[in-house]
Image: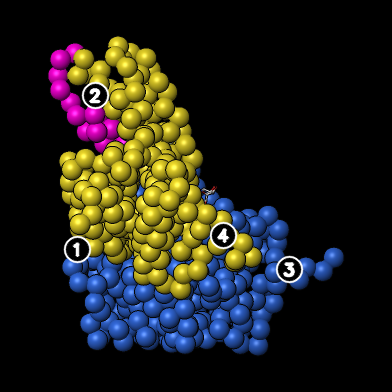
Chain colours: A blue, B yellow
Amino acid sequence: MVKAVKMDENGENYGKGRKAVEVRDITCAYNGHVALKDVSMDVMRGEFVAVMGPNGSGKTTLLRAIAGIVKPVKGEVRVYGSISYMPQKDYVNVNIPMKVWDVVAMSILAKGKKFRWSVKLSEEEKKAVEEALRAVAMFELRNAPFTDLSGGQQQRVLLARSLATKPDILLLDEPFNGVDLPTQEKIINLLSELSNGGITVITVVHNVSPLIHHVSKIALLNKTLIACGKPEEVLTAENTLRAYGVSIPVTVCEEGYPHPLFGDIHG
Amino acid sequence: MLPPFLERALLAVVLISVNASLTGTFTVFRNASFLVAGAAHAALAGAALAIIIEELGFHVPVLFGGLVFAVIASLSAGYAGKGKLNRVEDLNTAIAVSFAFSMSLAVLFISMIREYAARVWGLLIGDLFLLSYSDLKLMFFATLTVILISLLFYRAFMFVSFDPEVALAYGMNVRLYDYLLLSMIAVSVVVIMGGVGAILVFAMFVAPPATAVRFAKSTGFVFAMSFLISLFSGLLGIYLSFQLPFSPGAIAALTASSTYFISAFLKK
Ligand SMILES: Nc1ncnc2c1ncn2[C@@H]1O[C@H](COP(=O)(O)OP(=O)(O)OP(=O)(O)O)[C@@H](O)[C@H]1O
Ligand SMILES: [Mg+2]
């Protein structure tokens, strides 16, 4: 058994065109029940990766392993740079009436292992919170209690929280659930911009179509890695059949990107 | 000049309200309201054991036995309640089991005590007007500790209660903070209970913050409003106990828990 290693320092393997995340042959289990088996994948700096697969296929588990929340029982994860993690919303206690602003600020205050005595944000940190809130179009509601927001709005605040620390690597678990289409598009454009700027984005999605033009790689899971690579290589009839148990038709748009036609299967 | 018993009762009400505001609110945020009753009953087993040890010729303060057991019970519940990785909501089941366990242990220990077991039950029963100076001193120092820990670890307690998984991803020692929070709740519950009785603690620690959360627009509001609700309930209890033949604690507990139900109607 090898423990997951995190490397935070600006080591050799750091810089554009270098690896951001190395997943080496990991197996993850909860109380002996294997959730993810023999997964290996590399993610380079600035890549925009979509993780797909049916419910229970281990998508969240993969993100947790990369974030260091779950220790693989076998294999190793290496991470080069700072991480932000946005959980699926049902993992969050939505009964605490924290203000939106404070929810976003909490990631900045918690960053790093060092205990921080002051809860006051510096001017620079305040700006980071504001930028993050503006990026998800929630700045106007910064003083509203989190508990009063709609599900989609809460989702956006959680996304802002993960953006606020300006991480090198962003791990997002179904960030678009319940988010309206214009906001979703806005966020996708933002993530795309971030990845062009060298930030690595790894996001779990069920519907990849809205971001297919932006992602550089898709990882398709079903308890193990079915395929990982360029969208057109991964989204084949054979792979989707192996992942989902049904073959999902794919149309290729004018620009040459494959769009899976979920929920549009004609008898 | 107020008579000393009244002075002590008033001071106790203020101390209880501080604990209701801090410990109580964190308990409600952590979805662990049941821990208040759980810790209180675990303390019974500890108190009984302390008396058994005393009968063997070693002196152990009864309250100390209660404190140790309450802390152990809440930590075990915290440990067992983490079945589903870092989810916050499974704690109450674990507390219920730990509650049953410590009550059975309490019954077992009490049956082993040769002298009158009322001293054990005495831990559950208290009276605002019968507080001794040393009760009050202990409550005062416990409250001071609660204030200090709450100030120091406010952020950590909030993050760990809000989403432990992300706190872990940011490198926080989630287990440690969670155990600290659960221990603080246990100590605060047992010390106040030793002074004023269990019923008043149950009512004051849970009902005011649970009421406040209903109307809250911020976390600060919950802390402030729980303090005010407990203070009001306590003062009303003392005041009415001079007009009516009821114990001040009972009236205070009734008032505090009524606010919860009244707020439920108001919010509908
Ligand atoms: N905390 C946990 N404790 C025990 N088992 C878990 C836990 N989290 C996930 N599992 C199990 O691991 C497997 C993979 O779960 P995971 O959450 O990674 O799936 P997922 O692909 O994210 O699913 P979804 O699309 O529903 O979010 C499932 O069988 C699930 O039951
Ligand atoms: Mg998931």
Is residue A108 shown to the viewer in this render?
Answer: yes
Q: Do marks 4 and 3 share a chain?
A: no
Whether marks 1 and 2 lie on the same chain? no
Determine which quarter of the picture holds residue B261: bottom right
Callout in the foreground (4, 3): 4
| Residue B50: numbered disc | 2
Tell me which chain the residue with mark 2 is part of.
B
Question: Residue A186: image x %, image y %?
Answer: 52, 86
Which residues make up the magenta segment?
B56-75
Q: Position of residue A26 (x, y in %)?
A: 40, 51
The residue pinned by badge 1 equals A115
Whether residue A201 can be seen here? no
Q: Do callouts 4 and 1 mark residues in contact (Cβ within 8 Å)? A: no
How far separated are the C-alphas under marks 3 and 1? 49 Å
Nearer to us in this view, B203 or A106: B203
**Are dots 4 and 2 in contact, CB under 8 Å?**
no
